[in-house]
Amino acid sequence: MEPLASVFRIDIPTYAILSNHTHLIIRNRPEVVNTRSDRELAIRWLRVFTGRRIDEQLAEPTISDVDMIVNNKERFE
């Protein structure tokens, strides 16, 4: 949960893992997200949604992957 919380800039103050489901208390952080550049937002998005996760770790996107999103405003939106 920590890697995803850091990517999405949310706080998870508490959680409970039960045998068949999970409870999360989540606090969003719009004041933090609104200060990020387009490039940083693209990097954070690509860390989670590239399909290149290795051993449950978030993958670092390549410069060309980031440029492809940042330079295409329609896709970025």
Image: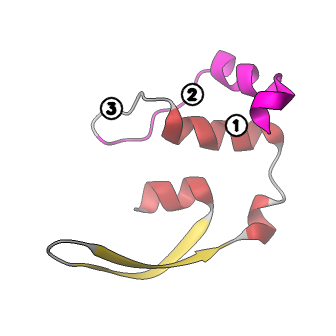
**Please, is residue 4 above or below residue 12 in the view?**
above
Report which residue position mark 2 lands on. 61
Residue at image point 76% right, 65% down? 32
x%, y% of residue 35? 84, 58
Query: In the image, what residue occupies the spot 51% across and 36% down?
Result: 49
- List the residue tagged with mark 1: 42
Above or below, 20 against 72 in this view is below
Quadrant where the N terminus lies? bottom left
Quarter of the image for residue 18 reads bottom left
Q: Amino acid at mark 1?
A: Ala
Quadrant location, the C terminus = top right
CB-based contact (under 8 Å), mark 2 and mark 1: yes
Can residue 63 be found in the magenta stretch?
A: yes
> How many C-alpha atoms fall within 10 Å of the one at disc 1: few (<14), some, or many (≥20)?
some
Please name whichever residue, 64 or 72, is drawn nearer the observer in this view of the structure.
72
| CA distance separating discs 3 and 1 | 19 Å
Among the two numbered marks 3 and 2 on one chain, the one whose residue lies closer to the N terminus: 3
> Tag 3, which secondary structure?
loop
Per the image, label 2 sits on a secondary structure element best described as loop
Rendered image: mark on residue 54 = 3
Say if the magenta span includes residue 61. Answer: yes
Amino acid type, residue under disc 2 in the picture: Pro
